Every structure is written in C-alpha cells, then in structure tokens.
Image (cartoon, helix red, strand yellow):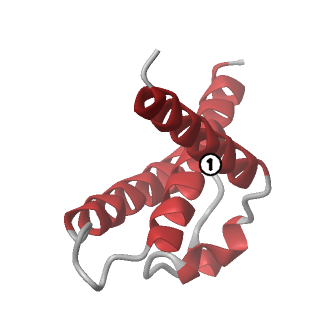
Amino acid sequence: MNRNFRRKQAAIHAIRMTVAKGSELYDRSRLSRLIPIDVGALAAGPEATRTVLKRLASALRSERARAGHWTYDLNRHLGLLQALSAERARLAAETSRAKK
C-alpha cells in the first residue's frame, strides 16, 4: 500500500476520533462561542434543536469556504463539527422520545 494513502487514512481516523470525543463532551451552554445565538433563550425540544442545526451548518459552510485563507481557523472548524454531531444526536433523541 502507498505510504501517503496510509498517512491520509490515519489523519482521517484521527479527525473522526477527535470529533467523536468532542461531541461526547459537548456542552450546549457554550454554543454562543461558536455561533451568534442566545443559548438561554433556546427552549428544549426538536424545533430549537433544528434551529441550532441550521445555524451550525451555515457556520460550517462559511468556515469551509475560508479554508486556505489566513482567516481560516482549524479549531473553530473542529468545534463546529463536534457541535453539529452532538446536536444531531440530540435531535435524534428528542424525536424518538416524542414518538413514544
């Protein structure tokens, strides 16, 4: 196997593990550090989570568009990925609770 291919696969695995671990440790009360949102005003429930997901997805698209530019921030990108992953899990849990 090609050495570059193995390095790329190892890097992808490391990033996936970082996002997974970060989403486990996610704290919604710190969300305002990533996106402009009043976390205290967010009601619990699927609609509030969908709103957060939309804003996170938009912020992630914006951050990806900056890749290669000096304003790009890898830590912010990873934080957005972690928050997005955690909020998706939260939405899945909320909708499964609502169906019961």
Around disc 1, counting alpha carbons within 10 Å, would you say few (fewer than 14), some (14 to 19), or many (20 or more)? many
Q: In x, y percent, where is residue 16?
A: 59, 40
* Secondary structure of the residue carrying numbered label 1: helix
Residue toward you, 14 or 7: 7
Quadrant housing residue 10:
top right
Relative to 84, 27 lies left or right: right
Q: In x, y percent, where is residue 12?
A: 51, 38
Q: In x, y percent, where is residue 36?
A: 43, 82
Task: Identify the residue position indicated by label 1 in the image.
Answer: 19
The C terminus is located in which quarter? top right
Q: Residue drawn at (22%, 78%), measured in percent from left and top?
A: 69
Q: In x, y percent, where is residue 21?
A: 75, 48
In the rendered image, the residue lying farthest to the top is 1
In the rendered image, the residue lying farthest to the right is 25
Examine the rendered structure and indicate whether residue 85 appears above or below residue 28. above
Examine the rendered structure and indicate whether residue 33 appears above or below residue 8. below
Q: Amino acid at mark 1?
A: Val
Residue toward you, 73 or 42: 73
Q: Residue drawn at (60%, 76%), measured in percent from left and top?
A: 39
Residue toward you, 21 or 15: 15
